[in-house]
Image: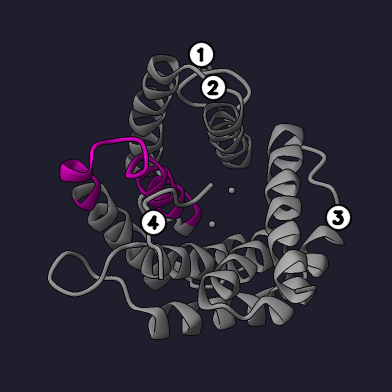
Amino acid sequence: MNRTFGLIAIVAASISTPLFADDFDTELTAIQQEWDGANYQMNDKAARSAAFTALLEHAAAFREQHAARAEAVAWEGIVLSTYAGEVSAMSAMKYAKAAREALERAERLNATALAGGIYASLGALYSKVPGGFIGFGDDELAAQYFQKALAVDPDNIDNNYFYGEFLIDQGDYAQARTVLEHALAAPTAADRPVFDTGRRNEIRGLLAVAERKTST
C-alpha cells in the first residue's frame, strides 16, 4: 500500500490559547481546537510549522500536568503523529515512534477514552507508517485497532473515517463506501466547527474515490 506520514488529522481556535484553564475538559477542548486550526486553517508552510511547534509544547505541558489522564496523554500522541507528517522523512519516524509510545501509554491508562479515539489513532499509525526495516507499520495490527475503536463507538466520525481510509488503501472500495457514508451521518461536533467541516470534507474526498472505483 502507499504509506505516508500524513496521519491524524485519530481529533484550535487560537495558538495563543492560555496554557492552562481551570477545568480539564475546557483545556482539552482548547488543545483540540488548536489542532483543528493548525491542521485545517494553516496553509502557509512556515505558519503551519510554527503552529504545530507551539501545539507540541502545549500538549506536552498539558500531559505533564495530567499524566494520569488518558485523554491528555493520547492528545500528545495525536499531535506528535500529525507532526510526523510535517517534518522531513529523516525526522518523521522519531515523531511517529514517540506518538506510538504516548498512545500505548494512554491505552494502558484507559483504552476506551476519547470514544475509541486511542484505538483509532493507533490504527492510523500502524496503517500509515512504513513497515519492514524502515518502521513499525503493520496492516493486520491496524485492522485490529480499527475494530476495537468501532466496538467502543461504532458511530464516531473519526473511528469510521480512519477505518474507511484504511479500507481504501486495502482496495476494499465497496466496504469503504459503507463505512464512510456512516461517518458522514455522525452528529455535528458543535464545539469544534473547524474540525467538523474539515473532517467531513476529507470524508467526501475519500467517498469520491470509493464511488469512482466501485462504478468502473
Identify the residue shown where x is 75% and y is 75%.
Answer: 214
What is the chief secondary structure element of the magenta stretch? Answer: helix
- Tag 4 or tag 3, which sits nearer the N-term? 4
Question: Mark 1 is on which residue type?
Answer: Ser
Question: Mark 3 is on which residue type?
Answer: Pro
- Tag 4 or tag 1, which sits nearer the N-term? 1
Residue at mark 3 to residue at mark 2: CA–CA distance: 25 Å
Asked whether 203 or 108 is in front, the reply is 203
Is 138 placed left or right of 214 in the picture?
left
Identify the residue shown where x is 20% and y is 65%.
Answer: 135
- Tag 3 or tag 1, which sits nearer the N-term? 1
Asked whether 65 or 212 is in front, the reply is 212
- Tags 1 and 3 touching, CB below 8 Å: no
First to last magenta residue range: 71-93
- Tag 2 or tag 3, which sits nearer the N-term? 2
Tell me the crowding category of disc 1: few under 14, some 14 to 19, or many 20 or more residues within 10 angstroms, Cα based.
few
Residue 135 among those drawn in magenta: no
Residue occupied by mark 4: 68
Residue at mark 4 to residue at mark 2: CA–CA distance: 32 Å
Residue occupied by mark 2: 42
Residue occupied by mark 1: 16
Can residue 106 be spotted in the picture? no
Question: Mark 4 is on which residue type?
Answer: Ala
